Image (spheres, coloured by chain):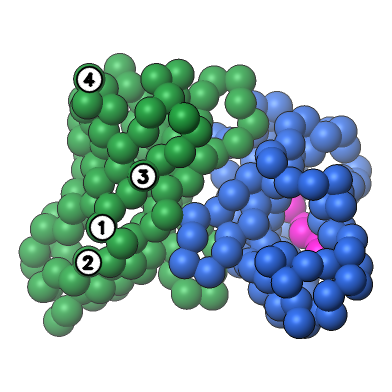
Chain colours: A green, B blue
Amino acid sequence: QQQVKQSPQSLIVQKGGISIINCAYENTAFDYFPWYQQFPGKGPALLIAIRPDVSEKKEGRFTISFNKSAKQFSLHIMDSQPGDSATYFCAASTQGAQKLVFGQGTRLTINP
Amino acid sequence: ETGVTQSPTHLIKTRGQQVTLRCSSQSGHNTVSWYQQALGQGPQFIFQYYREEENGRGNFPPRFSGLQFPNYSSELNVNALELDDSALYLCASTVGQRGYYGYTFGSGTRLTVV
């Protein structure tokens, strides 16, 4: 119940295309859903986050879509660029918990 | 001082040994969390410290222990190292007891146990 399942494991997108990464969860108490971006040799960096009271949040080229009834959320990267090539992690947490539960990660490659 | 600094960046230890990993948090960040990231996996929560007291612990055995100091630095200690302890260890700091908002992660320490 504490798991967050992420797919796909790897993704190749052409420059300018849309990258879509999906996550699913079971614990309905989760109330915070961030996405992290990690480059090789670096720690994860917060990209964008959403709470379950909204269905979509957009920041620049990055959008989170949230479906509370399906217990799913996804990251959309519009106009994908080679510099977006990285590993992306979804995560979830509950108010009062001290930890984030991370998905398994998606290695994204943007071909020029 | 900005950012989270971890040392060393890489470390090789022998099974059964003990290791201490260090983290220097961003100034003013009174909450530090440690995560273990196995190769090809997402980070897993080890424990969190808030104002020098343990404030939550994940599913890790007692041979994983920590300390947080008043100068915003912290340590992760692992005793009786096992081969499965080989991983990237990440330190993350933030402000406040509900310590997962606005995490700033360090670049990690890559531990290899042989």
Where residue B44 appears, as percent x and y from the top left, is 59, 49
How far apart are the two marked residues, 4 and 2, measured between alpha carbons?
26 Å
How far apart are the two marked residues, 4 and 3, measured between alpha carbons?
16 Å
Chain to which mark 3 belongs: A
**Residue B55, quarter of picture:** top right
Residue B81 can be seen, yes or no = yes
Q: Mark 2 points at which residue?
A: A11
User: Is residue A111 placed above or below B45 in the rendered structure?
Assistant: below
Give amino acid for label 4.
Ser
Residue drawn at 47 percent across, 74 percent down? A40
CB atoms at circles 2 and 1 under 8 Å apart?
Answer: yes
Give amino acid for label 2.
Leu
Residue B72 can be seen, yes or no = no
Where residue A26 appears, as percent x and y from the top left, is 38, 28
Q: Residue A69 carries which label?
A: 4
| Label 4 environment density (alpha carbons within 10 Å; few <14, some 14–19, many ≥20) | few
Where residue B61 appears, as percent x and y from the top left, is 79, 47
Give amino acid for label 3.
Lys
Q: Name the residue under label 1.
A: A8
Q: Is residue A14 left or right of residue B35?
A: left
Of circles 2 and 3, the one toward us is 3
Q: Is mark 2 on a helix, strand or loop?
A: strand
